[in-house]
Image (cartoon, rainbow, N blue to C red):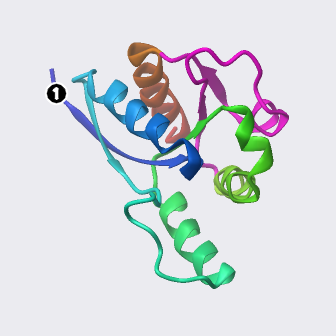
Amino acid sequence: MTTKNYTAFVSHSWDYDKQLKNLKSLIEKNSTITIDYSEVTVDNRINSEQRDYIRGVLKKRIISSDVFLVMAGMYTSYSDWMKWEIETAKKNNIPVIAVKPRGAERIPVIIQENADVIVGWNSNSIVNNIISAIENSSV
């Protein structure tokens, strides 16, 4: 079986950085794909405080991604950055996959209205939906 390589931008909250690391580990468990991640992390920040510059860098990373993943925790509804990232992905026809954190019962409206699919905390489900979203968006 050939391993497929994709680029993904993961929208997340720095306050929940451990969830991002856990998501990446979960995806890595599935050997059918490899992912190059393009999001900005606590450990790899954009060296600027200028909002327009930061948006420009983020937009380039989002639109150069094959898929946009978003952590579907309720904290998303309180983050202007995450809302803007989701809107940017949608405006640029990047497939949006929301990943529901383990134990989460509610999903923010911004995600319900914009996600192409909402998946649970399951490696096969996440990976299969990544592949499907990318293949369907390139038709």
Residue sitting at the far left: 1
**Where is residue 122 drawn, in percent x and y?**
45, 14
Figure check: 64 above or below 52: above
Residue 103 on the magenta segment: yes
Q: Which residue is mark 1?
A: 2
Magenta stretch bounds:
93-121
**Mark 1, residues whose alpha carbon is within 10 Å: few (<14), some, or many (≥20)?**
few
Question: Nearest the camera: 89 or 49?
Answer: 49
Residue 122 vertical position relative to residue 110 in the rendered view, above or below: above
Up/down of 43 relative to 112, above or below: below
Q: In the rendered image of this protein, does residue 119 appear above or below residue 98?
A: above
Displayed quadrant of residue 85: bottom right
| Relative to 75, 113 lies left or right | right
Residue at (75%, 38%) from the top-left corner?
Answer: 114
Magenta stretch holds residue 34: no
* Quarter assignment of residue 41: bottom left
- Three-letter code, disc 1: Thr
Taking the spot 79% from the left edge, 48% from the top edge, the residue there is: 78
- The picture places residue 44, in percent across and down from the top left corner, at 38, 65
Identify the element where label 1 is drawn.
loop
Q: Position of residue 46 (x, y in %)?
A: 47, 74
Inspect this view and state whether residue 98 appears.
yes
* Count of numbered tags: 1
Residue shown at 72%/40% (left/top)? 75
